[in-house]
Every structure is written in structure tokens, then in C-alpha cells.
Amino acid sequence: MNLLVIPVNLKYLLFLKKALSQMLIQPSRLSFFGVILIAISFALSISTGCKKDSIDSPIDESAIFPTSKIKSISYKDIIEPTWNRFTDGIDIPFEADSMRLSYDSQGHLTKKLGLWLSLSSATGYSGAFFIKKLGDTLDYSKNSVVVSKKNFGDPFWGTPQQDPATLTFSGKKLVKVTTYSSGVKVPLDTTVFTYDSKGILQKSVTKIFWRGTQTLLYKFTQGNLTEIDGRVVNYDGSEFGTSTELFWDYDTAPNPLYGFCLLPETFYRSLSQNNFRKYSITIKNASSQVVFSSEHWFYLAYDKSGNWVVSK
């Protein structure tokens, strides 16, 4: 798990390996900033020592979980949030592989089928692979959802060894995401979300086990997410780096993923009433030097009425 993490795809991973090798970076399948910080934060943690902070957020005992009828979502149309990119998958693959979604009778998501799996060279299968029969299961309780990786019948890949996550809701709002070590009920990373009086997301704070704190500030214009300013501070209080994410070129069509925050891949899109089609990220180190910058265009498909066709 990591600090100031940013989105990534298979082609970006290959680029970062070469462009940032001088920074002691060990890329994983996680995101522009996440790739950058995983190894660096590990090196820093050796000198700063291990430490575990805790953060809490007011929890309403009731929860109204998001519902949907969307059957599939292409990975090339979505991007993972920076608070999660150190825990899960490829962020902007150019390939049009899709996740397939299943629901219960009330419209609650229960299964995601199809995910990106990244393997190191030590396994003999270095690279990122899209596996159709690997995915997530979602189990609901009174005010939380546990998301766990599962093999749905692929004899080759076995069971993914990613850490499960618990999403806690207060009313309709996602207020906390806690990642636990596989097989052990010990929290590794905790992200807490805060909202204004109108229910608009203002800030997320992530405490990363034995590493530091990531703070993201969210900015909106006319109901649409336009900017996220990120900052990472090491446990000793020193600056680690900053990030700026921009979202623009919104269409005027209603967003079919609005409020659908159960999956990290849909979180950014769930925040806006319309659909962004351009995204950029700029990453700076503690000396305010740009260490990475990238821009991505999303080529969304529309029907005759001008609505985004999510399931293809």
C-alpha cells in the first residue's frame, strides 16, 4: 500500500519503468502516482520507522447502498481514485476489456467478474493480464460492504492474493474504506471521507500502515468534479510530494454511474452529474519538481439521444 498514488495502465507501467528507474521505483499495477511512491515510500519508511495511526469518522447505523442495473463497464472508460491505486488494478487500459456485473433482486451489486492481474518477473509471467474469471464478491451487512477477490473458475490463476476491503456507509454516503491484510483482521490502510452540509465530498484522508498520510481535496463546479489536490506527509512530518488531478471536457448527458461508488474503479465517475472525457495528473516531489505528468482522453460512446452507453 502507498502514499500519494496516481493512475496507471499497462502502457504507462512500461514507460514508468524506464523513465523513473533512477528514483528507485518498483512499479506495480497501480497508478501513475501509486507506481512512483510504492518503492520510494518503502525506502523512506526504513529510516522513519514503523508506526500505525488511526482515524475515525462519525458513522450512522443506517445505510442506503447504491443500486444499479449496469451489466458491464469497459476498463478504458474508468480510472481508479488515488486513495486506492496502491491496492488494486490497472487504471486506464487502452484495451477495451470489460468488467461484468451481477446484482441481487434489490439491485445491489454482488459480483464483479473480470480484472487486471499484475505479476512480477519472479513468477515467470511478468506483466499485466486481464483475467475474465477473476473478480470481486460484495457482502453486505447493516452499514458496510466487504469486497473480496475471488476466482470464479479459472484453473490456472488460483485465488488472487489481494487484501479485502470494507466500505462503511452513513446514509447514502461512503464515509470509510478500510483495507485488511488477507486472512488477518488487522487494518492496513484506512481512508476517511468528509462532506459538506450539502453532501458534497470535500476531503479524503488516508493513513497508510507504517508509512504516512495522504490528503486529497476535491473541487466541484456545477455538480461535476474538476480538480483534486493531493499531498503526502511522512510520519516524521516531512513533505513527501504533491499531486494535481484535473477533470474536464464534460458532456451534458446524465451520468449513469453517478453515486455508484461501490467499486474503486467507478469512484471518480460516481462523484459527477455528467461525464468527464479528459483527465490529467501532475506529480511533484518535496522539492516541487515535476516527476511525472500525463493527460488522457476518454472516447465515450453515445446513443442517438446523446446518452453515454456504458454497457456495450
Image: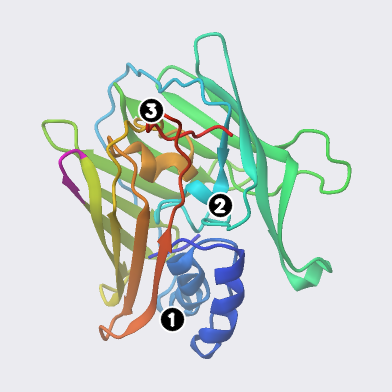
Label 3 sits on residue: 305
Q: Residue at x 74, y 47 (%)?
A: 131
Label 2 sits on residue: 88
Query: Residues in magenta?
Result: 219-223
**In which image quadrant can residue 178 be found?**
top left
Residue type indicated by callout 1: Ser
Q: Is residue 78 above or below residue 57?
A: below
Q: Which of the two marks, 1 or 3, is nearer to us in this view?
A: 3
Q: CA distance from mark 1 to mark 3?
A: 58 Å
Residue 84 versus residue 56: which sits nearer the camera? 84
Label 1 sits on residue: 47
> Could you tell which of marks 2 and 3 lies nearer the N-terminus?
2
- Determine whether the residue tagged by mark 2 lies in a helix, strand or loop: loop
Q: Is residue 36 above or below residue 280?
A: below
**In which image quadrant can residue 30 be found?**
bottom right
Callout 1 touching callout 3 (CB < 8 Å): no
Residue 68 position, x and y percent, is 46, 21
In this image, 162 relative to 12: left or right? right
Residue 214 position, x and y percent, is 32, 60
Q: Is residue 169 above or below residue 52?
A: above
In this image, 193 relative to 312: left or right? left
Q: CA distance from mark 2 to mark 1?
A: 27 Å
